[in-house]
């Protein structure tokens, strides 16, 4: 089996590389300087020469607020839509399995219950819209694919909320964090585990949702991150931190489908403990 990782130097791509390294599994790792997925000709040539069997697409534009600047014309659209299209076409041509990472932002966050894979998408920001358009392209073009929606990602190898909170605690005695947005944190190691689990166990193709178990607000997440620090955290509503892009108020996604496939999911609290113990 020949494996390709796109976006290999990013937060998730790096985690996935370390996971495969620990298992002694060989792979091709390409970042944007080595393979520009927005260049259809370059992607076609690469796939024709290398002919991967599995493509872990970790390439993504994730600057949510910046994506609002020029809807449809930013790097967001180029990478998350056109880049996804190019990878899907090339993957289908060589009969590869594509693993595409999507987001809870495909939902509008108005549902008081957990979102299932079958619930209607209604993205309210440009990033969520682009990722949803990527999902649609994968479904339209591909015959063998896994679309994995995730949320609130943190990990060892990139910028994320956990690192931000820990850094702020070094210079602040008090912090304010929003408490009216609820979701599920996701450790990159758990996500990478599921990506490889899906492929290696040949579970049913389709859409899955994967985060760590249990849900929380950003305030609750921050409180757990900093519970051993000398800092006071104040809960505030989102109006205190106005942002260009809409954020869902309640984007808790059901994990039942992934669990039914036999995948064991630890809580976000346990994931955070393991993550911090490894720092």
Image (cartoon, rainbow, N blue to C red):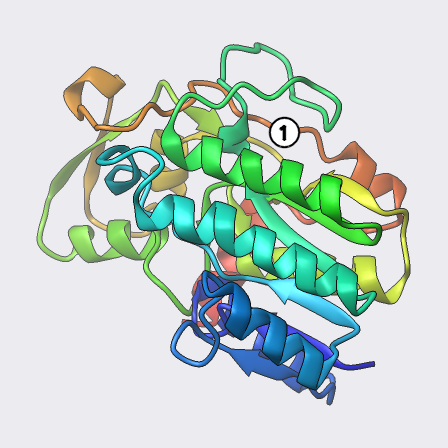
170 above or below 111? below
The residue closer to the viewer here, 30 or 226, is 30
How many marks are shown on the rendered structure?
1
Residue drawn where x is 73% and y is 89% of the image: 24
Q: Nearer the viewer, residue 33 or 162?
A: 33
Asked if residue 21 is positioned above or below residue 245 in the image, the reply reads below
Counting from the top left corner in percent of width and height, residue 61 is at 39, 52
- Pointer 1: residues within 10 angstroms few (<14), some, or many (20+)? many
In the image, taking residue 257 as reference, residue 48 lies left or right, namely left
Q: For mark 1, what is the residue? A: 253
Q: Is residue 91 above or below residue 184?
A: below
Figure quadrant of residue 56: bottom right
Residue 21's quadrant in the figure? Answer: bottom right
The secondary structure type at the circle numbered 1 is loop
Q: Position of residue 82 (x, y in %)?
A: 50, 50
Q: Quadrant of the C terminus?
A: bottom left
Relative horizontal placement of residue 154, taking residue 47 as reference (left or right):
left
Q: Which image quarter is the N terminus in?
A: bottom right
Position above or below: 130 against 10: above
- Spot occupied by residue 93 in the image (x, y as percentages of width and height): 77, 64
Residue positioned 18% across, 26% down in the render: 241
Q: Residue at x 44, y 53 (%)?
A: 79
Residue 32: image x %, image y %? 41, 72
Q: Residue at x 31, y 41 (%)?
A: 73
**In this orientation, does residue 16 appear?**
no
Q: Is residue 202 visible?
A: yes
């Amino acid at each position: 089996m020949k494996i390709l990782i796109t976006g290999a130097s990013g937060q998730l791509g790096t985690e996935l590389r370390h996971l495969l390294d620990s298992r002694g599994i060989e792979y091709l790792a390409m970042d944007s300087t080595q393979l520009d997925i927005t260049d259809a000709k370059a992607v076609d040539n690469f796939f024709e020469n290398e002919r991967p069997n599995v493509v872990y697409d970790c390439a993504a534009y994730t600057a949510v607020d910046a994506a609002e600047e020029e809807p449809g014309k930013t790097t967001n659209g180029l990478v998350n839509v056109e880049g996804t299209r190019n990878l899907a076409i090339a993957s289908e041509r060589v009969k590869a399995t594509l693993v595409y990472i999507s987001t809870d932002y495909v939902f509008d966050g108005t549902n008081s219950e957990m979102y299932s894979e079958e619930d209607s998408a209604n993205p309210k920001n440009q990033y969520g819209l682009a990722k949803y358009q990527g999902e649609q392209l994968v479904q339209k073009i591909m015959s063998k694919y896994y679309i994995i929606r995730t949320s609130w990602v943190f990990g060892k190898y990139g910028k994320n909320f956990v690192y931000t909170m820990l850094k702020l605690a070094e210079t602040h005695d008090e912090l304010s964090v929003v408490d009216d947005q609820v979701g599920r944190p996701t450790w990159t190691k758990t996500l990478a585990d599921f990506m490889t689990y899906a492929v290696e166990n040949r579970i049913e193709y389709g859409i899955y949702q994967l985060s760590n178990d249990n849900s929380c607000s950003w305030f609750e997440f921050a409180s757990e991150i900093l519970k051993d620090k000398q800092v006071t955290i104040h809960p505030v509503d989102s109006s205190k931190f106005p942002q260009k892009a809409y954020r869902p108020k309640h984007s808790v996604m059901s994990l039942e489908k992934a669990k039914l496939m036999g995948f064991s999911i630890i809580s976000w609290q346990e994931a955070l403990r393991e993550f911090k113990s490894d720092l």
